[in-house]
Amino acid sequence: MYTVDSNVQFAICIATEEEGDLEIWKIYRVLPDVKAEEVGCLRVIDESGEDYLYPQSRFVIVELPEEVRERLLATVEE
């Protein structure tokens, strides 16, 4: 069975920039990054498939049930 990485968070994008690599209302995977948090940012895997820093104000972190987290993470690894 797939084990959920407890360090991975998910966030919903609530604000985008023009011609950016984010879609409003989409759920994104957030990677742990202490230094990014210290400057008010999140390290997010965006539509390009790469991780970049974005202002925390563009997202709302969501707590998902373990089953949902497992399914989301499983789709990433396929």
Image (cartoon, rainbow, N blue to C red):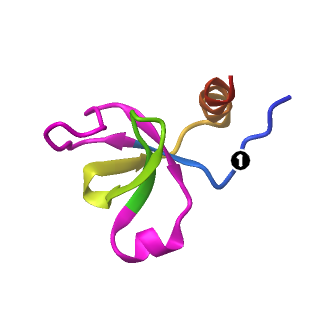
Q: Is residue 36 left or right of residue 8?
A: left
Other residues around mark 1 within 10 Å, as few (<14) / some (14–19) / many (≥20): few
Residue numbers of the magenta segment: 12-41
Q: Is residue 54 left or right of residue 29?
A: left
Q: Position of residue 8 (x, y in %)?
A: 60, 50
Q: Position of residue 31 (x, y in %)?
A: 54, 54
Q: Residue at x 41, y 53 (%)?
A: 52
- Numbered marks: total: 1
Q: Secondary structure at mark 1?
A: loop
Quadrant in which the C terminus is drawn:
top right
Q: Residue at x 35, y 75 (%)?
A: 39
Residue at the far right: name it: 1
Three-letter amino acid code of the residue under disc 1: Asp
Q: Position of residue 72 (x, y in %)?
A: 59, 29
Quadrant in which the N terminus is drawn:
top right
As for residue 24 lying within the magenta part, the answer is yes
Q: Position of residue 6 (x, y in %)?
A: 68, 52
As for residue 52 lying within the magenta part, the answer is no
In which quadrant of the rendered view does residue 64 lie? top right
In which quadrant of the rendered view does residue 7 lie? bottom right
Q: Residue at x 48, y 36 (%)?
A: 49
Q: What residue sits right under mark 1 in the picture?
A: 5
Q: Residue at x 51, y 45 (%)?
A: 63
Q: Nearer the viewer, residue 17 or 65?
A: 17
Residue at the far left: name it: 18
Q: Is residue 24 left or right of residue 43?
A: left
73 is higher (above) or lower (below) than 43: above
1 is higher (above) or lower (below) than 56: above
